[in-house]
Structures are given as C-alpha cells and as structure tokens.
C-alpha cells in the first residue's frame, strides 16, 4: 500500500515560540520553554536539535511512505524556507505549506513572496491557543479578522489553494469550526483541511458530531487524523487505539472516506507512539475497506495537496533573493 504522511514537520532548527515563550534546544531531542517546561520533541535517533529530511528518508523507506506533506507550526518554529529547499530538491516527493503570523506588519508581503516566488500553494494557520497564535495574541476570528481576510482575498487568485488549520480544542478561544464553514462557503475554489480531527474526545462524541455535521455539506472541507492518539491519551500499549477508532468511525460515517487524510504530526507524535504504530494502526482495524484505506492513506492527500498545478508551481519556483545573493 502506498502512503502519504499528510501531516509532517521537518525541522532545520528548533525555533519555537508560543504561550510558554521561546524554545531553546537541550540536545537529545529535548528542548525547554522560557517558562521552564521541558518537552521531548524529537524521537531518539532522529536528531538532537533538528529533524532533517535525511533522517526521514530511512523512516519513509521502512514504512513505505511514498510522499509527505510538510506543515508548519509555532511549536517547532516556522520552517518555511527549509521546506522550500526540501521541495525543490525532491519535487513531487514532498509538498509544503508555509505559515505567517497575520499580525506581522509585513504579513501580506510574506504571503506574496511565498506564493509568487517560492511556489507554495498551501498555507497552514496554527491558530490554537495551546500551541499557536492564540497563545500570544488577543482572540481573533480566522474568517472575519481583516488581517486574515486580506490574505484570503489575495489567495483567491489561486484556485486549488489548500488552507490547513489547527484551531485547538473546545476549551480554547481558538476553537473555530464555524469559521472553517464560513470560509469554505466564501472560497469554494480552495480546499480546507482541519487538523487532528477537530481534537476529538471519544467520551464526548456529540461534540465531534456537531462539528462534523457542520462540515458535511461542504466537500472542500477535509480532516486529517494526525496526533489523535496523543490528544486522546492513547499510547504504545493501546495500539490500535480503541478511542481513536470510535472517533474515526464517526468521521467516516458523516464525511465519508474520501474526506479523511492520514498523517502523523511527527516528529513530536512519534515520541508518544512509534512511527511504525502511527503508520500501521488503521490497517489493524476494520474501519475501512481496502479501497477506502487507499483513499485515506494516499489518494486523498495526493488529490488535495499534490494537485498537478501545485506541484508544477513548486517545481518551477526560483528564489530571486537567493539567486542575487549567490552572485554577490
């Protein structure tokens, strides 16, 4: 079976910043936040202070991963330029989303550079309060804040663009499933991917059902399954994760198998459960038929993220700033 990891983070250097302050590497895959919290971000053997593409290649081979979608977040620090470099080196094998803080004075300039010069056709909004922009900004709505709207108005010129959103769980001010619905209505030419199955809780399926029912009428809203083991507190000993099975079964029932994307949220999630477990758990359940599993594990991510025009834009991108720098 071919597989695409639809939610992966490569890390050129740890540069996290969120509600706990700045992140400083400690080595051996560990780092410390300014508030004193120590976090294990990188599994043993994957890197001390980074997780480079060269470290991921043997994992890909071992787990039969054909391609990967490279996403950004404030946990590791935005790795936009390293993502551009990796996609340029290995076109068609990797595709990437970039991130920007809409509150930056030059936010729109940053967006234009990444789209027009660096060839990105996906953007990741890590807006969660626990790990993203709501941890150090006043609450804002992704669908109506003028700074965000300015970005969406610009992106409207690029049909097929992918907007990936992590809005955290229901206890956070960032939890905005309604905003995704409004944006999907306003921008039917985009695809929206909600990360982490909207932070499910197997003991509160009504809450998840409410969100999925909101998404149901809009075929341009998909969900990914990354990190739902961590979110629901399931570890290596719980494989193949009965709580996750309950929530994914509900997602399939409401959205169907063609709107679900498998992913891992590695490297961090691979410190809780082995990458092998994350890559094979769905095969060890009866949730999907063989054809449905192929959709979830490969076809859906390939259809959404690896659109031919999006891959072509990434392949043809040339950074004029770096080219001028080389000639100095």
Image (cartoon, grey):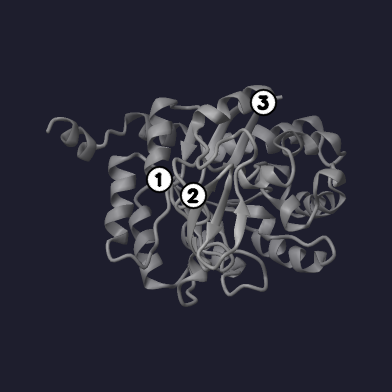
Estimate the x, y position of residue 68 in percent, counting from the top left: 56, 34
- Kindly tell me whether residue 209 is visible in this rendering: yes
Which one is nearer the viewer's eye here, 252 or 86?
Answer: 86
Above or below 77: residue 257: above
| SS under mark 2 | loop
| Front one among 157 and 94 | 94
Eyeballing the image, is 152 above or below 122? below
Disc 3 designates what residue?
2
Determine the residue positioned at 65% across, 58% down. Answer: 217
Q: Which residue is mark 2?
A: 72
Q: Which residue is mark 1?
A: 80
Assign a secondary structure to mark 1: helix
Find numbered disc 3 in the image and state the secondary structure of the residue it sits on: loop
Which quarter of the rendering shows the N terminus? top right
285 relative position to 190: left or right: right
**Cβ atoms at labels 1 and 2 below 8 Å apart:** yes
Disc 3 crowd rating (10 Å Cα; few below 14, some 14-19, many 20+) is few
- Give the CA distance from mark 1 to mark 2: 7 Å
Mark closest to the chain's N terminus, 3 or 1? 3
Please name which of the two marks, 3 or 1, marks the residue nearer to the observer: 1
Q: Nearer the viewer, residue 60 or 27?
A: 27
């Amino acid at each position: 079976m071919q597989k695409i990891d639809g939610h992966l983070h490569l890390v050129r250097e740890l540069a996290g910043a969120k509600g706990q302050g700045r992140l400083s590497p400690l080595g051996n895959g560990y780092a410390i936040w300014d508030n004193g919290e120590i976090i294990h971000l990188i599994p043993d053997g994957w890197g001390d202070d980074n997780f480079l593409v060269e470290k991921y290649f043997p994992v890909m081979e071992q787990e039969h991963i054909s391609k990967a979608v490279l996403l950004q977040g404030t946990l590791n620090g935005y790795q936009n330029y390293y993502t551009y470099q990796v996609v340029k080196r290995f076109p068609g094998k990797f595709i990437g989303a970039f991130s920007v803080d809409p509150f930056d004075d030059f936010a729109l300039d940053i967006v234009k550079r990444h789209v027009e010069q660096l060839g990105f056709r996906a953007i990741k909004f890590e807006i969660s309060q626990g790990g993203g922009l709501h941890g150090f900004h006043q609450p804002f709505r992704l669908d109506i804040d003028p700074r965000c709207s300015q970005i969406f108005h610009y992106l409207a010129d690029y049909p097929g663009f992918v907007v990936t959103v992590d809005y955290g769980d229901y206890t956070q001010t960032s939890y905005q499933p309604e905003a995704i619905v409004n944006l999907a209505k306003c921008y039917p030419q985009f695809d929206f991917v909600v990360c982490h199955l909207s932070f499910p809780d197997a003991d509160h399926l009504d809450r998840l059902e409410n969100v999925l029912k909101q998404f149901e009428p809009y075929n341009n809203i998909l969900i990914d399954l990354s990190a739902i083991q961590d979110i629901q507190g399931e570890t290596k000993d719980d494989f193949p994760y009965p709580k996750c099975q309950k929530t994914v079964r509900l997602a399939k029932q409401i959205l169907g198998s063609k709107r679900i994307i498998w992913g891992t949220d590695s490297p961090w999630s691979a410190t809780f459960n082995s990458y092998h477990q994350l890559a094979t758990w769905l095969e060890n359940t009866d949730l999907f038929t063989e054809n449905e599993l192929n959709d979830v594990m490969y076809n859906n991510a390939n259809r959404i993220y690896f659109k031919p025009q999006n891959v072509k834009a990434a392949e043809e991108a040339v950074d004029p700033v770096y080219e001028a720098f080389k000639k100095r």
